[in-house]
Each structure stands twice: as C-alpha cells, then as structure tokens.
Amino acid sequence: MLAIIRMRISIARLLFLVFLAAMTSACTIHANIPNNYDVTYPKDTEKIPLRIGLCLDSSIDNIDLPSTPRGGLVVHMNDSLTRNAELMVKRMSNIVIVDKRNVTNMPCDLKSVDVIITPVVTSMRLHLLQENFNQVLDFMISIKWSVVDSGGKTLYVNTFIGQHSCEPYRPLFGGKEMAKECVQRAVEGHFRKAYEGIMTTKWWSQAIK
C-alpha cells in the first residue's frame, strides 16, 4: 500500500513538472530591469584628485538576454548598466565628465580630462536549469574596466564578475520579480567589486606624476 502511494506521488510530481514545462514554453516572461540599484559602496573613500572622463558605449544599453538552455524568460537590461556606471564613477572624483557614444568603437570626445575610464561588457549569461524538482535561475555578468591617461597610456585594467542564483524559480508564481531580483543582485555585486578594485590600487599616482 505504501509503495502504491509513493508511486502516485511520484507520478503527480512528474505530471506537475510536465505541466510547468508546457506552460513555460507557451508563455515567455519578460522582466524589465530597473536602473535604481541599491549598491552599498565603502564610506569615506578618498577621492581621486583628477578630472575623470567616463566613456560609455550605448551598445550596452537595451540588451535583451534570453535564458538558456531552457527558454521562457527574457530580461531587458534597458539603461541599467550605463546609468549605474555613471553613478559609480561620480563617487570617485569631484569632476566627472560623461560621454556616451552612439556608435560602437568610436572614440569618446573627452579632451578636457586627465584620465578616461571605459567599461566594456565581456560576457553576460542567463541560465535556467532544472535541478531535481526545482528550476534554478543563474545570472552572470562580466565587465572589463580600463583607465588610460590623456596620452593613451594604460594605467589600470581589470575585469570584475557579478553572479547570483535564485531558487526555486517558479515562472508562474512571481517569476518576473524573482528574475529582476536575481539580475539586480548580480549587477550590484559587480559594481561593488569594481569600485573597490579600482579605488584600492592607487593607479592615479602615475597620472599625477
């Protein structure tokens, strides 16, 4: 009798998973990522005593990223990356000039600054996986930050990764909000690491000399 009950429970779980998979494939969830992240930066950090130019490539705006290998979810990054890059760099110096390029690989027009900071997205991944009876949503973003002086000499280069996983991911029960939270946590983690990495190396001493 107990074996029959267990078998019925297993069959019910299997049918439920099949139902969820069918509903997910039939209905794609779209999650719009806001730009009002709550990034906690270190307090009382020394300002960089230079005029900083932030060179932003508009190609990293409005990225639409579908989930793999399982479909059913698309996150829309909108202007969340460029907006938060601007907010982060403005914490580094009292003088920050922002130039947003409309064409990829075109040089920024930043002539009245001492150094130019440029972020470039090197990788972005949205994984939706099945583990046992749960779906797991995992988001990863990698951005390379480079700093050059007015003569084009490289003063600093580093790549920082932000990653966050959310489970169990239930697309039919708050899936959109969970996707937004997962992406936001990963991006917040990236900017926190990038700020600390850029500010703790004291690379600007080379530019002051």
Image (cartoon, rainbow, N blue to C red):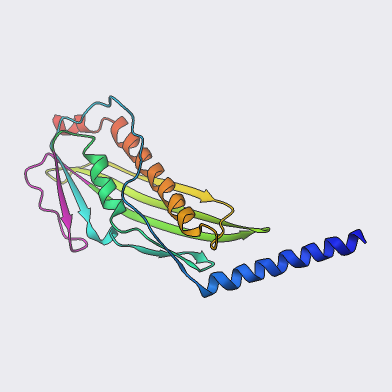
Asked if residue 129 lies left or right of residue 145, the reply is: right
Question: In the picture shown, does residue 63 fall above or below 186?
Answer: below
Given the current orientation, which residue lies at the most extreme left position?
112
- The N terminus lies in which quarter of the figure? bottom right
Residue 177, image x, y percentages: 46, 54
What residue range appears in magenta? 96-117
Residue at left offset 30%, top offset 36%:
198
- Reply yes or no: does residue 108 show up in magenta: yes
Name the residue rendered at 26%, 49% in the picture. Answer: 83
Instruction: Tell me where residue 14 sits by quadrant.
Output: bottom right
Q: Is residue 124 above or below residue 151?
A: below
- Depth order, front residue of 154/178: 178
- Does residue 198 appear to the left or right of 130 in the view shown? left
| Image position, residue 4 (x, y; %) | 88, 64
Asked whether 19 falls inside the magenta stretch, the response is: no
Q: Residue furthest front?
A: 173
Give residue 75's position: percent from left, percent from top: 41, 61
Where's residue 141, x and y in %?
40, 52
Numbered-mark total = 0
Q: Nearer the viewer, residue 170 or 42?
A: 170
Q: Residue furthest right?
A: 1
